[in-house]
Amino acid sequence: MKKVNEALAVILEDWQRMQETEGDEGEEAAERFEANFYEFAREFKRWYHSLDHPPRTLDELESMEEVSQIQEALPGPLQLNFMIEMEEIIDGIDTQRFD
């Protein structure tokens, strides 16, 4: 979970930076955020698969303390993105992303 929390900290910093920039600088910040968000999602997926007994439903996953803490830390607009990532993990969907 340490790597997940480190990746979370990076995307929260990126999110804040993105909110404070515009134009070319804003575009660069958005691209960095996107790349780091998907790295966060990869780390979360690795953590999930490392669990001895991973949750089998989204509700079970969301009820975990670690996941609740992540959801509380995420700004509102990012919560849907995280929810989609969790659903794909539970459903066994392996989305390929090309940055």
Image (cartoon, rainbow, N blue to C red):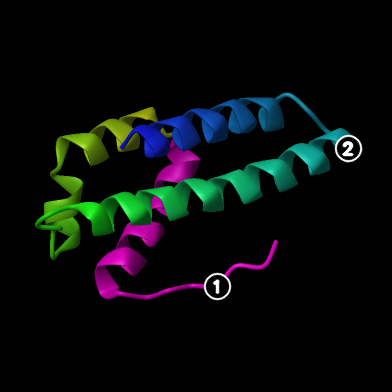
Left or right of 8 in this view: 99: right
Left or right of 12 in this view: 68: left
Q: Tell me which amino acid carries mark 2.
A: Gly
The spot of residue 38 in percent (x, y) is: 54, 53
Left or right of 55 in this view: 15: right
Residue nearer the viewer, 7 or 72 = 7
Q: Residue at x 45, y 55 (%)?
A: 42
Q: Is residue 92 visible in the rendered structure shown here?
A: yes
Element type at mark 2 = helix
Marks 1 and 2, how far apart in space? 28 Å
Indicate which disc, 1 or 2, sits on the residue closer to the N terminus. Answer: 2
Residue 89 inside the magenta-drawn segment: yes
| Secondary structure mainly formed by the magenta segment | helix
Q: Tell me which amino acid carries mark 1.
A: Gln
Left or right of 93 in this view: 27: right
The spot of residue 71 in percent (x, y) is: 32, 37
Q: Residue at x 39, y 39 (%)?
A: 4
The spot of residue 40 in percent (x, y) is: 48, 46
Q: State which quadrant residue 49 falls in.
A: bottom left
Q: Give the magenta part as a residue range.
A: 76-99
Which label is found at residue 23?
2
Numbered disc in front, either 1 or 2 = 1
Q: Residue at x 80, y 36 (%)?
A: 26
Q: Residue at x 59, y 26 (%)?
A: 13
Name the residue carrying label 1.
96
- Tell me the quarter of the image containing the C terminus: bottom right
Q: Residue furthest right?
A: 24
Eyeballing the image, is 17 above or below 65?
above
Q: Is residue 75 visible in the rendered structure shown here?
A: no
- Tell me the quarter of the image containing the N terminus: top left
Number of residues whose C-alpha sits closer than 10 Å to that of mark 2, classed few (under 14), some (14–19) or many (20 or more):
few
